[in-house]
Image (tube, helix red, strand yellow):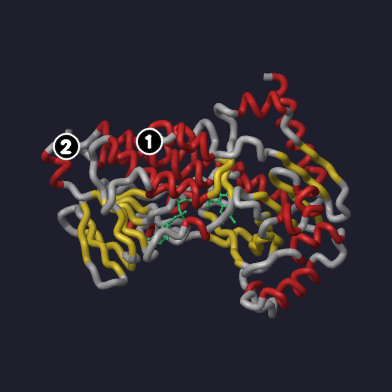
């Protein structure tokens, strides 16, 4: 039942990514209304990023609480867990292929895969119509003397909120209300390419990639292939580079054919089949610098403002935790708000303590993994680390 206090208090969530959507849905289930302000004119999740592993201990917990776990199970792919690590000559260091009995066991729990767009659709269809205001890009947020926050949007709208939650990703416009600390470039640049209908158009490469991920690592560089649900192989040609490399490299990324030729030069002494990951890519190339917040990042507590997901702890994607943490934050914050409907400050305090601990641990893991993946002898060292993990699992 909605109390009078809840009716009076406006909760604004900035950003309709996986974190913001999960939070709005959970609060809706607890009878706490929110408004999500999203900068895009409509949902763009299908065009952003590829397959995500949803972990049992975090992302799946949030989906269970949101009442979507069974629908998620029907959409998730439990069989695409193959993982290969090779070096630039194509020498194989790890060739992991789950056995049928492991796949059966994984039908509950584990780390099933789902494409980002499919996950967001699942959340979106359960959220009450009208909850999301599209075309509202937050320009700045201003703290008012009465403890509320004033939100200024690029469409000219100005609104106020009793509680403001920044779920607006790495370059959060809410974060400056809480801290002067900003994201830092991690030193890694990734170029995202797509090989569409891989099994049909490039069967040899599809067979080499198998049903999952292929990491080719050497010389502080990587070609990473990831099979997505729609049959494409998403490719990340990745390397350590100066922050300004995208501008100074002389590569025009809006001219894909030319850009691919220049990228092939960067990997010129690599195995020809590995270079096919670049040659066969069809559509636009999406350059990305990978950013991170300092490990253990915290801010000064504000009883009317908090952050979840990448806004709170963006890290490199090498622990595969980003989306899981965004959803887990949403779960922890929603539960804390449901416990303390009349005291947002208390709810925020409870949530932030748990989140800081969990995120610092994952940020450390992610950074260690980034250094290993793009360090010397990466294929051998990553394989050694994976083998140790497999042995630990086998002993459990
Ligand atoms: C190359 C790459 C690969 C990745 N692979 C994985 C992986 O395998 N597994 C994994 O778990 N994670 C992965 N991640 C990380 C994952 O994508 C993020 O951690 C996750 O999307 C964070 O969710 P979020 O809701 O916090 O933020 P986001 O997904 O960034 O969503 C933020 C939302 O806020 C909106 N927004 C932004 N600014 C404003 C504004 N000013 N006003 C209004 N709206 C705004 C955006 O349009 C967006 O909808 C990867 C990331 C990258 C870059």
Circle 2: element type: loop
Specify whether 240 is left or right of 153: right
Q: In percent of the image, x 33 and y 68: which residue is there?
A: 139
Quadrant in which residue 334 is drawn: top left
Quadrant in which residue 38 is drawn: bottom left
- Is residue 361 visible in the rendered structure shown here? no
Q: Residue furthest front?
A: 200
Q: Which residue is identified by label 2?
A: 2
Q: Which residue is identified by label 1?
A: 66
- Coordinates of residue 95 in the picture (x, y in percent): 80, 39
- Coordinates of residue 151 in the picture (x, y in percent): 26, 62
65 above or below 12?
A: above
- Coordinates of residue 260 in the picture (x, y in percent): 73, 71
Q: In percent of the image, x 46 and y 36: which residue is there?
A: 71
Specify whether 207 is left or right of 72: right
Pick whichever, 256 or 58, lies toward us: 256
**Which mark is first along the chain, 1 or 2?**
2
Q: Could you classify mark 2 by the number of other residues whose Cα lies within 10 Å: few (under 14), some (14-19), or many (20 or more)?
A: few
Pick whichever, 35 or 295, lies toward us: 35
Tell how many labels: 2
Q: Quadrant of the N terminus?
A: top left
Q: In percent of the image, x 39 and y 43: which residue is there?
A: 22
Quadrant in which residue 113 is drawn: top right
């Amino acid at each position: 039942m909605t109390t009078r206090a809840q009716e009076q208090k406006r909760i604004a969530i900035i950003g309709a990514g996986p974190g913001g959507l999960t939070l709005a849905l959970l609060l809706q289930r607890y009878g706490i209304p929110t408004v999500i302000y999203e900068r895009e004119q409509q949902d763009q999740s299908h065009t952003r990023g590829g397959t995500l592993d949803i972990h049992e201990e975090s992302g799946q917990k949030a989906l269970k609480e949101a009442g979507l776990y069974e629908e998620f199970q029907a959409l998730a792919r439990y069989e695409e867990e193959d993982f290969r690590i090779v070096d630039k000559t194509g020498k194989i260091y790890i060739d992991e292929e789950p056995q049928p009995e492991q796949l059966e066991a994984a039908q509950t729990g584990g780390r099933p895969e789902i494409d980002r767009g499919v996950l967001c659709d699942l959340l979106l269809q359960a959220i009450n119509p009208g909850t999301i205001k599209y075309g509202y890009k937050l320009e700045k947020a201003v703290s008012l003397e009465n403890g509320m926050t004033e939100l200024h949007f690029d469409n000219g709208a100005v609104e106020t909120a009793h509680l403001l939650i920044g779920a607006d990703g790495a370059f959060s416009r809410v974060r400056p209300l809480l801290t002067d600390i900003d994201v830092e470039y991690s030193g890694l640049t990734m170029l995202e390419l797509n090989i569409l209908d891989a099994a049909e158009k490039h069967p040899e490469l599809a067979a080499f990639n198998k049903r999952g991920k292929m990491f080719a690592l050497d010389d502080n560089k990587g070609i990473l292939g990831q099979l997505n649900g729609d049959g494409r192989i998403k490719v990340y040609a990745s390397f350590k580079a100066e922050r300004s490399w995208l501008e100074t490299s002389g590569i025009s990324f809006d001219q894909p054919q030319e850009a691919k030729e220049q990228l092939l030069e960067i990997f010129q002494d690599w195995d020809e089949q590995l270079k096919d990951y670049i040659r066969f890519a069809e559509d636009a190339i999406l350059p990305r610098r990978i950013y991170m917040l300092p490990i253990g990042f915290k801010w000064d507590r504000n009883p009317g403002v908090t952050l979840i997901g990448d806004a709170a702890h963006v890290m490199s994607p090498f622990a595969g935790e980003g989306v899981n943490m965004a959803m887990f934050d949403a779960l922890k914050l929603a539960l804390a708000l449901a416990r303390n409907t009349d005291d947002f400050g208390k709810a925020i305090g409870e949530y932030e303590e748990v989140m800081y601990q969990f995120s610092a641990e994952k940020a450390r893991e992610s950074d260690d993994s980034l250094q290993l993946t793009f360090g010397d002898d990466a294929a051998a060292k990553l394989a050694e680390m994976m083998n140790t993990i497999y042995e630990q699992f086998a002993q459990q």
